[in-house]
Image: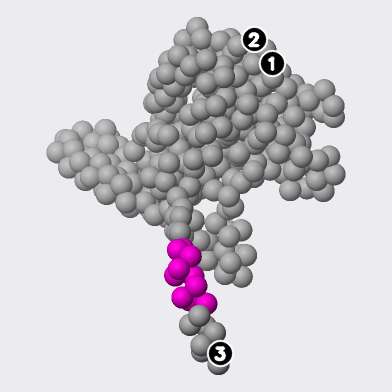
Amino acid sequence: MPEEFMLDFEKPVIELEKKILSLKVSAEHSKIDFSSEISDLEEKKEKLKKEIYSSLTPWQKILLARHPNRPYTLDYVKTICENFVEIHGDRAYGDDKALVCGLATIDNNPVAIIGHQKGRSIQENMDRYFGMAHPEGYRKALRLMKMAEKFKRPIVTFIDTAGAYPGIGAEERGQAEAIARNLRDMSSLEVPVISIVIGEGGSGGALGIGVANKVAMLENAYYSVISPEGCAAILFRDASKSQEAAQALKITAKDLFKSKVIDEIIKEPLGGAHLDAVETAMNIKRFITKSLNALSKMTPQQLAEDRYMKFRNMGIYEEKVIKKAAKNTTSKSIKSRRK
């Protein structure tokens, strides 16, 4: 793991890896057998990794979700899809590279693929707007969804964005309207829709391609109405309190599964998806295949109704009925006090 991408809580593991590497190099040059010492350090390293990664705080998981080496949509598409053909443009304004859209097959099942795409280099991130889509991106996505519905293709979306692009141009071209239209039209699509949050799941930018029959999250992803930094700046008037906000927002996969916002948590390799992109991709593929098999048994009308009711039933609330007699008693006691 390159040190420039090392997170603070990973330092103890990195130090052990350095010691192991140093012993291996010494053994090779000096012809001395260090196998016992190396084995002990390897065992210690694995134990330490389990301790660290099994007790990550919400903020630490957010840091993993934002890791620059974390796999993006196209990385997963290359691994789990065959015959991927990308489509471009919204037929109204232009093409938005922050949202990748195309047709593909997964184990010979034809699907439509939509996903946020970040860049690896500074230039690529600028070209892809750091994965934050403009209105034309959401309109391109909806164009593909309608095409998929016409040809009876299931839709698979990969969510990985800090939010919709917040620039003036995006607002002028109808950012809110584009996302709202996607929410409305996705709710009534008569084909299966599957969404996976693979990294960041920020606000309406994420939900704009996230109204699905089955929603899953990678173990170290997050899904939230606002970023922890934004929440801290608004509520605490201090963006440096983002760790406290992350804890309060309940935005990790475990929290959201518990509150039934998502249907499944997809396992990541120990240490994060960036350490084994292929294993993570295979875990995602298994979820997609399982979901497609389950949803294929539903009629088009049932699929739309299932998706609608899924979102209608989200959330936990209490209903309290106040009896009329009790209300009258309360009002009388108030009047008596006023006298």
Looking at the picture, tell me which residue is in the foreground, 29 or 237. 237
SS under mark 1: helix
Q: Image height check: is 73 above or below 167?
A: above
Outermost residue on the left side: it is 36
| Label 1 to label 2: alpha-carbon separation | 6 Å
**Dot 1: within a 10 Å radius of its alpha carbon, few (fewer than 14), some, or many (20 or more) residues?**
some
Judging by the rendered image, the residue that carries numbered circle 2 is 151
Horizontal and vertical percent position of residue 265? 39, 36
| Label 3 to label 2: alpha-carbon separation | 70 Å
Three-letter code for the amino acid on which mark 1 is drawn: Met
Judging by the rendered image, the residue that carries numbered circle 1 is 147
Q: Is residue 255 visible?
A: yes
Do the numbered discs 1 and 2 sit on residues whose CB atoms are within 8 Å? yes
Looking at the picture, tell me which residue is in the foreground, 322 or 146. 322
Looking at the picture, tell me which residue is in the foreground, 162 or 156. 156
Residues drawn in magenta: 322-331
